[in-house]
Image (cartoon, rainbow, N blue to C red):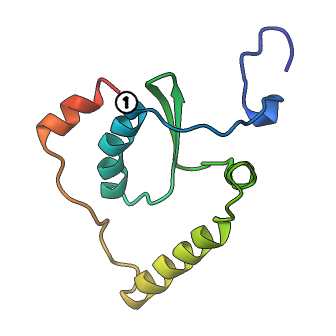
Amino acid sequence: SGDGDIRSNISAGGTAKAFSLNSRQLEVVEIVKPLLIRDGIFFAGLDFIGDKLTEVNVFSPGGVGVISQLIKVDFIDEIINELERKHYIRSHYNYKLSKMGYPIKTRDMNRIKYC
């Protein structure tokens, strides 16, 4: 990363450190979770700066290997097993299952604006 490059992620030379989410970040996760489930997303990466949600990575959550190393838990096999399970179940229904979830109430949508 050269002058003027504001990236700070791993691919741009950033370093990863283990940390725990604070109560506000956990609250934001609980607000976003049903929205992701409603849209059929079971695995995503949430990026925070302080208490503000800045990005939801659904196409390329990334960092799985780094996170596994940091917390010393190999959950990559679990992700692959869950993908295979979902594929297997959907194949029995000719891939015509709708997204699972529930309707989001207006008050929940209003709360998300402040995340």
* Image position of 50 (left or right of 35): right
Vertical side of 19 occupied by 103: above or below: below
- Quarter that holds the C terminus: top left
* Image position of 20 (left or right of 96): right
* Residue visible at 18% across and 47% down in the picture: 104
Residue under label 1, please give it. 24
Vertical side of 47 occupied by 102: above or below: below
x and y percent of residue 106 in the render? 13, 38
* Residue visible at 36% across and 87% down in the picture: 93
Q: Please tell me how crowded label 1 is: few (under 14), some (14-19), or many (20+) other residues with Cα within 10 Å.
A: few
Residue 78 lies in what quarter of the image? bottom right
- Quarter that holds the N terminus: top right
* Image position of 53 (left or right of 77): left
Instruction: In the displayed orientation, state which residue is furthest to the top.
Output: 4
* Image position of 96 (left or right of 13): left
x and y percent of residue 91 in the render? 45, 86
Residue type of the residue flagged with mark 1: Arg
* Residue visible at 40% across and 90% down in the picture: 92
Between residue 28 and residue 109, name the one nearer to us: 28
